[in-house]
Amino acid sequence: VVPATPAIFEKKLRNQEAEEGSTVTLHAELSKHDAPVRWKKGSVLLQASNKYEMKQMGSAVELLIHDLQLKDA
């Protein structure tokens, strides 16, 4: 049995600036299509909600953070 190679970032997340109350989109490209992705802030696993929206289209993944607040930095 050969273990599967893990997905790696082909295009990494970039730091972004945005205004409080707005929405910011974090975008990355992975080396594998439809690889499982978990989004975290520190050690906290983020869950889809009104605040966090997760999208995946093939190897492209996005995290949208709505109603941006200083604590989201």
Image (cartoon, helix red, strand yellow):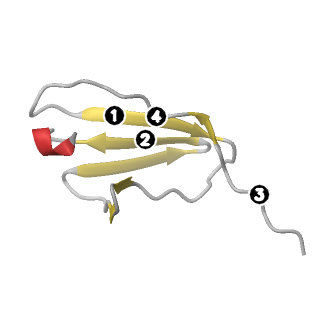
Q: Quadrant of the C terminus?
A: top left
Question: CB under 8 Å between callouts 2 and 1?
Answer: yes
Crowding near pointer 3: few (<14 within 10 Å), some, many (20+)? few
Q: Is residue 38 left or right of residue 36?
A: left
Circle 2 — which element?
strand
Q: Mark 2 — residue?
A: 62
Circle 4 — which element?
loop
- Which quadrant of the figure has residue 72? top left
* Viewer-nearest of discs 4 and 2: 4
**What's the residue at 51%, 56% (across, down)?**
37
Is there any visible trace of residue 48 in the rendered image?
yes
In 3D space, how far apart are the residues under numbered discs 4 and 2 (Cα atoms)?
9 Å
Find residue 4 and report its horizontal and vertical position in percent: 78, 63
Circle 1 — which element?
strand
Crowding near pointer 2: few (<14 within 10 Å), some, many (20+)? some
**What's the residue at 31%, 49% (across, down)?**
53
Find residue 25 and report its horizontal and vertical position in percent: 33, 34
Q: Nearer the viewer, residue 56 or 36?
A: 36
In 3D space, how far apart are the residues under numbered discs 3 and 1 (Cα atoms)?
28 Å
Mark with earlier residue (2, 1): 1
Q: Mark 1 — residue?
A: 25
